[in-house]
Image: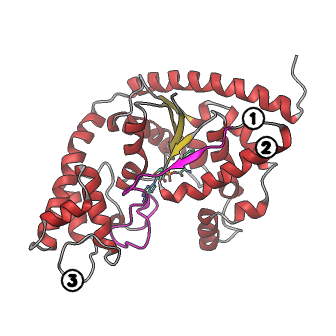
Amino acid sequence: MKKRLFSGVQPSGNLHLGNYLGAIKQWVELQKDNEAMFCIVDLHAITVPQDPAELRKKTLEIAKIYLAAGIDPGKATLFVQSHVKEHTELAWILNTLTKIAELERMTQFKDKSQKDGKEGIGAGLLTYPTLMAADILLYDTAVVPVGKDQSQHIELTRTLAKRFNDRFGEMFVIPEGKLSKEGALIMGLDDPTKKMSKSATSEYNYIALTDDAETVKKKIKKAVTDSGSEIVYADEKPALKNLLNIYALLSNKKPEVIAGEYVGKGYSDFKNGLAEVIVNFLAPFQARLKNISDEEVLVVLKAGAEKAGSLAEQKMRQVRERVGFLANY
Ligand code: TYM
């Protein structure tokens, strides 16, 4: 039987290889045998200030990135989160079932609140995971393909689903997260102890999906490496391990096999090879991206919102009834 799959990306910052290898690449495979829904989570993006015109532009761009990466609107449902009002409605109900302590434990919230202080960040950043739980639970999702940085949010989603079911009777499917093997957490090129991140201060942290060949070569050349000169795949060499993971995922070979191809060669040859593999992936991807029109995307998103909206409406009717809201006759 086909499983329901749900995942999403925020339309903020520059999408990078970490987003692609951790999430979107898996989606393209998984859409074949499952009932997939891929969302552009604009409601999540506004948990930090966004320029309205820029947000609209980014939302369209992410939809184009999904299509250029190989998401097939004939197989999967693509839609914008704010087009389906039920996400915010369910998020509110889940908020009332969530402990403040559970939200304050989330690494993402802790990082942001430590950086800017609780006086400096909005309440949306705290309640962000209940909105993500709503996204997932609204559609009876069984599998959530994401990067490892989202695991804690999925754990909370499972807790909230169980809590609702215990209190009001069986309603939500308990979802499972699904991580890519080598791509679960792609690290920063400038610091292999931190994840590659859209909000990184240095552009040498990431390869954006829109970077041109020259930029890719420059960034890979500058990427930090470990001590020693051998190309080996080992935990003791975290920087190299990360570069080998990227190489492996983009060339569909095992990282150990790639390391074997560079026996007797140094970092310079390896980095040239890696830059070439990245450019060979990005060039056709960017060509496809350029050819997708706004009109084409809007048609796909409208159909997606209709499909998602009708599923969400059915589910919310049941949820409202269980919670005890009076029907609007
Ligand atoms: P976001 O927009 O930060 O990231 C989108 C996806 O990319 C993955 N990712 C990475 N994977 C590997 N290595 C990295 N360095 C890396 N950086 C990011 C993320 O894990 C994610 O899968 N809260 C989510 C969006 C969301 C969502 C959802 C996801 C909202 N509702 C429901 C799944 C289901 C987020 O901020 O992702």
Compared across the picture, whether 106 is left or right of 201 comes to right
Residues at badges 1 and 2 in contact (C-beta under 8 Å)?
yes
42 falls in the magenta region: no
| Dot 1 crowding, Cα within 10 Å, few <14, some 14–19, many 20+ | some
Q: In this view, does 43 lie above or below 315?
A: below
What amino acid type should be assigned to the residue bearing mark 3? Answer: Gly
Distance CA(mark 1)–CA(mark 2): 8 Å
Which residue in the protein does label 2 denote? 164
Q: Residue 238's image quarter?
A: bottom left
- Residue 308, position as x, y percentages in the image: 59, 27
Q: Is residue 259 above or below residue 37?
A: below
Which residue in the protein does label 1 denote? 171
Which of the two marks, 1 or 3, is nearer to us in this view?
1
Part of the protein shown in magenta: 173-201
Which residue in the protein does label 3 denote? 228
176 falls in the magenta region: yes
